[in-house]
Image: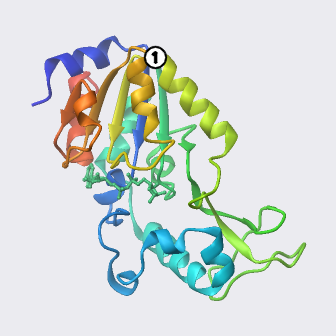
Amino acid sequence: MLPESLIAALRGAQHVCVLTGAGVSAESGIPTFREAQTGLWENYDPMDLATPEAFLRDPELVWRWYRWRRDLVAEAEPNPGHHALAELEGLVPELTLVTQNVDGLHARAGSSDVIEFHGNLFATRCFVEGCIVEVADDDGVPTCPGCGSPVRPGVVWFGEAIPASALDQSFAAAKDCDLFLSVGTSSLVYPAAGLAELAKRHGAVVAEINPNPTGLAANFDHAIAGKAGEVLPDLVAGLGGD
Ligand code: APR
């Protein structure tokens, strides 16, 4: 049962800002970052693969990992958590959805204007000039038809800057919102993890939804220990969405 005060905050909110992390896609069968990598990749640490240095050192290995993730996502379906957020969009005056996920599942569930803080697995561009390059799903590292440089996944790697527009829009929404929901993220990676605290400092009610309370939960108004695919539909139902 969700706290009545959280439901009331949602009912009264003019602007809801939601930050999602890998936990929102867990119930779609996509492993989170800080669970042990599964199967073929269990001996690799994402931190050692998701960097420009790793790509330059061994583009073939990094591409194989990303193709594995693209295939995993292509077979996955949005879950009730994704669908609840898509439904919420039509039930509140303004909703800003910021995701750290690169799987595109929010858009596939019907959410519009998703701010992809860390880019998207399926946006591929050449390493040198950044021109968009469509890649076939065959093996090997694709090369840019224009400059011949290797093609990289359109995601933000460790050590790289968040796209300026995503950063600006997300920070503006965190400052402006009345209710901030932090869903399925370990709140370990900044600047994304700073959004909830920013919202709190600007007077928003802040709730975390995560089966495992994070280190920031103590600063929030609510820490709902539950799965996104169960709690988010309940939250929307509480709004009278169902
Ligand atoms: N519902 C909600 N939360 C869940 C669920 C679920 N069903 N299952 C797991 N979780 C929670 C875990 O408890 C954990 O706190 O999701 C969180 C996932 O944390 P991470 O694996 O650290 O993923 P995330 O927070 O998105 O990582 C942030 O770090 O590795 C980088 O760029 C990468 O975007 C990623 C960023």
Q: Indicate left or right for 111 with 121 as reference.
A: left
Asked whether residue 236 is in view, the answer is no
Asked whether residue 114 is in view, the answer is yes
Vertical side of 25 occupied by 221: above or below: above
Which residue appears at 35% of the width and 62% of the height?
32
Q: Name the quadrant where ligand 1 sits.
A: bottom left
Mark 1 is surrounded, within 10 Å at the Cα level, by few (under 14), some (14 to 19) or many (20 or more) other residues, namely few
Q: Indicate left or right for 5 with 133 as reference.
A: left
The percent position of residue 31, horizontal first and vertical second, equals 34, 66
Q: Indicate left or right for 47 with 22 as reference.
A: right
Q: Which three-letter amino acid code belongs to the residue tagged 1?
A: Pro
Asked which secondary structure carries label 1, the reply is loop
The percent position of residue 239, horizontal first and vertical second, equals 26, 22
Vertical side of 61 occupied by 227: above or below: above
- The picture quadrant where one finds residue 231 is top left
Residue furthest out toward the left: 1
Vertical side of 107 occupied by 206: above or below: above
Which residue appears at 51% of the width and 42% of the height?
191
Which residue appears at 65% of the width and 82% of the height?
57
- The picture quadrant where one finds residue 194 is top left
Which residue appears at 62% of the width and 47% of the height?
162
Which residue position is annotated with label 1?
93
Does the numbered disc 1 mark a residue whose Cβ is under 8 Å from ligand 1?
Answer: no
The percent position of residue 18, horizontal first and vertical second, equals 41, 34
